[in-house]
Image (spheres, rainbow, N blue to C red):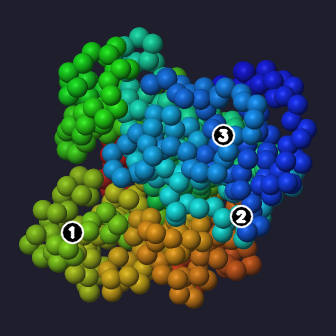
Amino acid sequence: MSASLPHRRQVIAGLGLAGLGAAARASGDPVVRTVAGPVRGLADAGLSVFKGIRYGGPPARFQPPRPPTPWRDPAPALAYGAASIQRGAEPNQSEDCLFLNVWTPAADRAARPVMVYIHGGAYATGSGSAPLYDGAALARRGDVVVVTVNHRLGPFGYLYLSRLCPGFEDAGNVGMLDLVLALHWVRDNIARFGGDPERVMLFGQSGGGAKIATLMAMPAAKGLFHRAATMSGQQLTASGPTNATRRAQSLLDALKVEPGDLASVPPARILEAASAIDPVIGSGGIYFGPVLDERSLTRHPFYPDAPPQSADIPMMIGNTHDETRGFFSDPAMYALTWDALPGKLIPNLRVDIDPLLVIRRYRELYPHYSPSDVFFAATTAARSWRAAIVEAELRAAQGSPAFVYQLDFPSPFDGGKWGAPHTFDIPLVFGNLAAPGSITGTGPQARALSERMMDSFIALARSGDPNHAGLPPWEPYDLARRQTMVWDVTPRLVDDPRGAERRLFEKVPFIQQGT
């Protein structure tokens, strides 16, 4: 991907941009020379902010990304770039979506730690433009450079066509290759924005964490980042090529087209076809995610072991105590009866275990739990927390540092019924407690916890160790003690929290849904 960079540097060097510094001083807005061309950002309350920087050219559908065509005049970087085509209400969607955003204390050569956030939404929705991901508070507090990224999603990023159509051998992982290209951009440009290309941390929640786990096993990503933090997002296995081919064929059948015609099908039709029943899972829309294609991805991310190529990367692995409360808004799920509970558990545990055994054990462990409490606790432990434990165990077996956390601090909203649900750690880590979508509240306890969590992520980015003066000592996870930082009003290091729940589910194999 970087073969053309020396030529592009020569092009930029000859553009005669000596007057940019004076122009920036005159307007008050920062201008930075990137490898592809100059960009003009915005001075905002002590930060320099650049939104919508192009890191890739308009991508050809189902093909690997390409660097952008160099430009001469300063390109405005004042508004977020387009998000990937996707279902849902994400604004400003386009197949031309390879943009990133930068918040920096100064566009100088100060070599600050770099924190690159990869958004969630599985591999199907979202963008780096959500208010929750605004990097200003984090950049100010930690004197760090924050980057958020857009990339191709859903069938546009992960439709595996290698067995169906010559010329599309990389289609199953172009969404991941977009992220690799974005990391090349960081490596080649971030020093001009005040960042240190040798101290790049990836952090991401849900699908963002899964993408990070996948990047940890991609040879093309080796050396492009140096720390990793996953928040409620794990990827043990990728989709196998046979299942991925079945999914591609299901999409083609729904569209009633041949593989060679896909490049000209309107995006809206492709999205509509992707809502067909998944031929592997048997429900929902078609799953799209990274594929073991033997090209970009030659092993599963965390199977059969932790990826050796990332063994030297310090890693944080976190989850929230009540993950699945963030997935169910139906009031009926909060008023389950004991009779209804087994039927609700069966399709939602995502492991094959006797639901009556699960219910009996939870009632022994937590006699005060209601049926709904048991449902959310068991589904969190079986489907959302389980893969994080496996990743931590594999890192410990490898002898690689893994700092594990569990967020217990509960949301004050709706009488506390949400607990600490999926996505709850995002505003705490970014310091965006009042942003749309946050349910942390803005009280003193939430603010104090947010500051501690921000400082740990910043410390990991800065030194590879999340410890700081505001915490009890945070030890790496090992198989003897399973040390876990429990984030609450008073953070504490706990050995094997919810150990009985962990042991209940470790008796059955876990297969990541979709793979």
Residue at image point 54% right, 29% down? 58
Q: Residue at x 30, y 31 (%)?
A: 270
Q: Earlier in the sequence, mark 2 or mark 1?
A: 2
**Which quarter of the rendering shows the N terminus?**
top right
Answer few, some or many: residues within 10 Å of disc 1's Cα (few below 14, many 20 plus, some between 14 and 19): few
Q: Which circle, 3 or 2, is nearer the viewer?
A: 2
| Residue, disc 3 | 183
Q: Secondary structure at mark 3?
A: helix
Determine whether the residue tagged by mark 2 lies in a helix, strand or loop.
Answer: strand
Q: Residue at x 12, y 76 (%)?
A: 337
Q: Residue at x 80, y 55 (%)?
A: 27
Q: Is residue 428 left or right of residue 76?
A: left
Residue at the outermost left position? 339
Which residue matches tag 1? 330
Badge number at residue 255:
none
Q: Quadrant of residue 418?
A: bottom left
Where is 388 relative to 277, above or below? Answer: below
> Which residue carries the number 2 mark?
44
Q: Assess whether mark 2 and mark 3 are in contact (beta carbons under 8 angstroms).
A: no
Image quarter for residue 240? Answer: top left
Residue type at mark 1: give it. Asp
Q: Is residue 85 left or right of residue 188?
A: left
* Residue 424 in view: no
Label 2 packing within 10 angstroms: few (<14), some (14-19), many (20+):
few
In-front residue for pair 261/502: 261
Q: How far apart are the two marked residues, 3 and 2, measured between alpha carbons?
A: 25 Å
Per the model, the C-alpha gap separating discs 1 and 3 is: 40 Å
What type is the residue that disc 2 sits on? Asp
* In this rendering, the label closer to the viewer, 2 or 1: 2
Give coordinates of residue 489: x percent, y percent: 54, 85
Circle 3: is it few (<14), some (14-19), or many (20+) Cα within 10 Å? many
For marks 1 and 3, the one nearer the N-term is 3
